[in-house]
Amino acid sequence: MFKRVVERKAIRAEATLQADIRQLLLDADLNLGEEDVMTPELEAQVGDGTGHRIDIEMGATVIEVKKDISRPKIRKEAVDQLAKYVRARTQQHERRHVGILTDGADWRAYTLVRDELNEVNRFDARERNVKALDLVRWLEGVLATSEGATPTPDAIATRLGADSVAHSIDKAVLAALYEENKELPTVRLKRDLWARLLRSALGAQFEDDDDLFIEHTLLVNTASLIAHAVLGIDVKDTAPASLVYGQLFTQARISGVVESDFFGWPLETEGGEDFVRDLARRLAGFDWSKIEHDVLKVLYESVITAETRKKQGEYYTPDWLAEATVAEAVSDPLNQRIMDPSCGSGTFLFYGVRRYMAAAHDAGLPLREALDSLHDHVAGIDLHPVAVALARVTYLLAIGRETLTSEERGPISVPVYLGDSVQWDQRTDLIDHGHLVIQTGTGGQLFANELRFSESLLQDASRFDEIVNELADKAADPHRAKGKLPSLAAVFNRHGVSDADDREELTENFRVLCELVDEDRNHIWSYYVRNLARPMWLSRAENRVDVLVGNPPWLSYRHMPSDMQKTFKDMMQARGLWKGFEVATHQDLSGLFIARAVQQYLREDGSFAFVVPNPVLDRPYWTGFRSGEWTDPDHPVKVQFTGSWDLRRLRPHFFPRAAAVVFGHRRSLAIGQQGNNAVALARQTQIWTGKIPKSAAHWERAKGWITRAEGELRYPKDGLISSPYRNRFAQGATVVPKVLFFVEEQATNPLGLGGGRVSVRSRRSTLEKKPWKDLPDLESSIEKQFVRPVLLGEHVVPYRVIGADKAVFPIEGTKTLMHGEHDHLDRYPDLANWWRQAERLWDENRSSNRLSLIERLDFRRGLTEQLPGAPLRVVYGASGMYVSAALVDDPNAVIEHKLYWGTVATRQEGMYLLAVLNLPYTTEAVRPLMSYGKDERDIDKAVWELPIPVFEPTDPKHARISEIGEAEAQRIAELKFDENSSYIQIRRTLRDFLLSSPDAEELDQLVTELLG
């Protein structure tokens, strides 16, 4: 049936296609049946007096079927017709309807946005490898008919992720709601406070973008509904306000899970309740009693782009690693208070709660007593409001539905707070003479009221939260007359506020809250105050925790905006953590984050366990951190490192960079006290190796795939003497976007092109990115001298160059680079036509106006440095598991940026360098010097940190190394390779070949002696 539907046949009647699609909907696993209310109905009357009939209707979906919608005119007419049907049904049923336009092959989903039908998603059933199940899943997202689906990570990503049709529809509706209502005072207030909070934490790194605010709103409302669903609440039959504001949780005495926050604004708009109902209907298709806690981070990662997460240094930890780390760090869960200062979606909190609850059960603690103490034993902070919303639900999942619904439990508070653990600016922004100060002004207000709370009020966190909530609720009471301030005597008596200064301060705060309500700027001040107060409260000496555990943000200095870089550098220098010069760009936020978290939140003698980038263990630029002495002039910190886990050899990689875990204790600073010196991180480490299957989500399963052995780290030498060759080698040209340069020759017509010209068209790649991948091919004839060979990383294997690509370069003669306005360009009509067309496409599609096309091509002089081409050049790959080097003897060849190149005077010198560079010993020697990716793969110029001397033909050792290099090159030149072999396979074959070479042992000995 799927094949019948997707085939476009001119002879097929629309009625036949309609019937086939209806049958496909019935046959597919869409929870539809002949007698079901969701049965697809053919030719349904619109009922608007026009006599028009809907082709197929089911539930809240209208399907318009045409024989072929590939022609724009037919498609436009069909969309206009579909819009009338969707509008009519939306008005008749007072519920949002969606539309589908299809010809069986092309499926397009539409929703009404400001009464106009907008296309929000498309599915092409004829694309390669598309199966019937793919279409069924797409239809499920539109129809929202699934029931009882298990919320596995794959199901969540497929049905709710950013690429799903469901997400496209929900986001389009939410975006329209925001656009229509963004000037409402309450909506504008929430948007401003959201931006203020994230900006205070992230600085210029935060992009104040409406689209991100809408994404956050969708995610947090989704998390709120999931929180209800996991407790068995039928979200389809629950009032939207109750779902968004958490009223059922309040009735159940479960606080801190779902509450009025930045993202409840849809309910303050016309159409917002319908949006929540539709979202609830979609989420009700899952059986949330079967939820795995890790699906929440899957939801987050599938909606928030990798680029956005990278800017914030967010890398979520695998469950098995979080579980193992918590088990190692928390030895006495009933007597240790733990906190994750960057809790993300709550993975470490989950295992902290589970470990505490298991210990309470084993100790025979009554359930009520165990839950009463849980709030004080496991807590989390994160600066990302979406992560906090997900972490709160994760915390509930760790407690478990059975426990939460038990008659034995008392009130439960979920201690997951929105806050900035680093507190970049809070010394000046929030604290003033022992008071927490919250500015209530927004936008361009010159004078703004303040909310001020003394430290004495903050001492008892639960009491403070209750007081602030009561003040906000009392100010928002609809029975309070505008401008009136009711008495607070009952509030003071109920919470034991007897100090006259505290009463005066709370009364003034209440006056400000009442004014905010009267100005329609209320609703979330209690939420905002309580979350900003929490980091301050937890940093008080008496409130600091026994254990810090988690995965801090990983953000390299080179990826920070300039103002954040300055603050970061100042804070790093103040603590003795900064390393300058060339390694400055590799400095990472995770080290400062740990130092600040220990400084503020960990009691003396308390312990910590953090997942960190693997370079922490052995790279020179982490020396200050590894010392354990973090010399903040205001509050110096000393720690004793107690061990580490080296995880770089685990596969598959679970972060974009290799990882490790470090453990330690905070030392006392008491003068004269014994044993209070810092203890540096030792060379001894526990090395983990193994390949962990995807199914091994939990530690009990994963540990069986891991081998753990004691080992010793190798430190690169800080004072290593680098090679004189370092300055002779440079990175190749950045030839992008490839569609404008790389070409392949094509056949000409029988008459030919005349001498010196060749017909070419763009050579395309599956690795192209938008917008370049969507551009049409460039196609033209070109003067032959402007089509040059280009060597990429994949063309270089040990001792040999295999093939080359071709690209168009506007290089006149041997060294003149011409741009579109160059005086000589029009001497070459074919090139001029190509180049000006390329410049036009670049100008229309580039993301920044900073560089012209010629400046992009010659970025950092990557091309002009190669002109005129040298007769002999050594090239090697910029990255790879092993160094691969070859000799290039074509001066016309352009070296691309995935390669480094350097000129040599003679072939003998070239063979000397190839012999040294291609030796496996050299890679092992340079590996500790490489910057980290997932492995030590980024060779770059690190190889020249080795003391490789300049070739001297009169030196017997140099001469013999060169002779062996020549012999190896000749042997490899005679080898033949399968045309279907990849360069990776060829490199592997050649490494094995070189290891078995008759000269291998001698060469290894000579180079070992050469490098010392």
Image: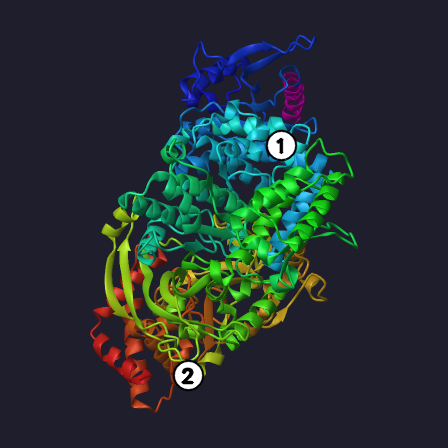
Q: Is residue 630 left or right of residue 712?
A: right
First in sequence: mark 1 vs mark 2: 1
The picture places residue 88, in percent across and down from the top left corner, at 66, 16
- Dot 2: within a 10 Å radius of its alpha carbon, few (fewer than 14), some, or many (20 or more) residues? few
- Chain part drawn in magenta: 73-90
Q: Nearer the viewer, residue 799 or 862?
A: 862
* Distance Cα–Cα, label 1 vs label 2: 60 Å
The numbered dot on residue 88 is none
The numbered dot on residue 719 is 2
- Dot 1: within a 10 Å radius of its alpha carbon, few (fewer than 14), some, or many (20 or more) residues? many
Q: Nearer the viewer, residue 704 or 446?
A: 446
Looking at the image, how many numbered discs can be counted on the residues?
Answer: 2
Which corner quadrant of the image does residue 117 belong to?
Answer: top right
Secondary structure beneath label 2: loop
What amino acid is found at the position of numbered circle 2 in the picture? Gly
Q: Nearer the viewer, residue 197 or 709?
A: 197
Q: Is residue 537 left or right of residue 482?
A: left
Q: Where does the C terminus fall, quadrant-wise?
A: bottom left
Q: Which residue is mark 1?
A: 173
- Indicate whether residue 44 is drawn in magenta: no
At x 47%, y 35%, the residue is 227
